[in-house]
Amino acid sequence: MVNAQPICFAADGLLLNGQHRLMAVILADSAIEVPVIRGLAPAAQATYDLHAKRPAEFGPSLDCFGDRALVSAMANLLWQRELRPSGARHAKATAAEIRDILERHPRLLELRSFGRKMIDHGRASVMGYGAYVIERSDPVRGPDFLRALETGAELAAGHPILVLRRQLQRLRRDKVPQQEQLAALLGGWERYRGRAGR
């Protein structure tokens, strides 16, 4: 359907906006009617595509319990901390980047249940992604640490995991930013690892 969104070219012929629509035209081997603007300054490209990204499509298996939003948030944390290119203009991963992350990191998808169970200790996305980082860093001790963190069972008073649980609950109540919650979780894990390695 014709709308007010033009295909935009710079004065030198560089395509500034509309590459996805033009690619769709090529793939569909079809024609569309669309306004075209030519002669723009190349710097105008920085003003395009600043709207929110389209959510990723994961299929029907993630349509319940808010899993779609949770998995996207976990994948975004991984992208922001591990994959974001320097100088990237967008603050969040694209739908395609999220799908790629989940294909390459299937365990991240599985740990969403841990994130939901730990909602009193931090945002589900923070706890799920943090659990993934912990398991990756130590596949032997990481799962034991996460089980103890989840339940707090059979830990002596003053145990570092109990201290961490209380700290995370306090931060959650105070509604601190997710990066601060994640730093506390991973910092507690590093202290535990250091103590266990002695």
Image (cartoon, grey):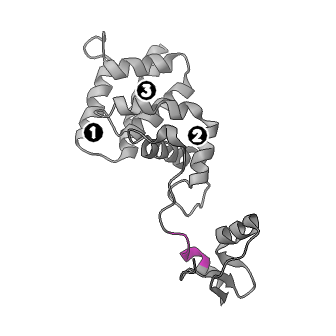
At 55% from the left and 64% from the top, the residue drawn is: 89
Q: Would you say 21 lies left or right of 62 here? A: right
At 43% from the left and 26% from the top, the residue drawn is: 189
Tell me the CA gap for discs 3 and 2.
24 Å
User: Can you say which quadrant of the picture contains the N terminus?
Assistant: bottom right
At 54% from the left and 44% from the top, the residue drawn is: 58
Tell me the CA gap for discs 1 and 3.
16 Å
Task: Give x and y (percent) for residue 165.
Answer: 30, 26
Q: Does the magenta stretch include residue 75?
A: no
Dot 1: within a 10 Å radius of its alpha carbon, few (fewer than 14), some, or many (20 or more) residues?
some
129 versus 10 height, above or below: above
Tell me the CA gap for discs 1 and 2.
28 Å
At 64% from the left and 87% from the top, the residue drawn is: 37
Task: Give x and y (percent) for residue 93.
Answer: 55, 53
Q: Would you say 136 lies left or right of 66 here? A: right
Task: Give the residue at mark 3.
Answer: 189
11 versus 81 height, above or below: below
Q: Give me the disc on residue 102.
A: 2
Dot 3: within a 10 Å radius of its alpha carbon, few (fewer than 14), some, or many (20 or more) residues?
many
Are discs 1 and 2 less than 8 Å apart at CB?
no
Query: Type of residue at label 1?
Result: Leu
Q: Which of marks 1 and 3 is nearer the N terminus?
A: 1
Query: Type of residue at label 3?
Result: Trp
Q: Would you say 145 lies left or right of 53 here? A: left
36 versus 46 height, above or below: below
Q: Can residue 193 be seen in this view?
A: yes
Q: Give me the disc on residue 171.
A: 1
Residue sitting nearer the eye, 41 or 195: 41
Q: Earlier in the sequence, mark 1 or mark 2?
A: 2
The residue segment tinted magenta is: 45-50
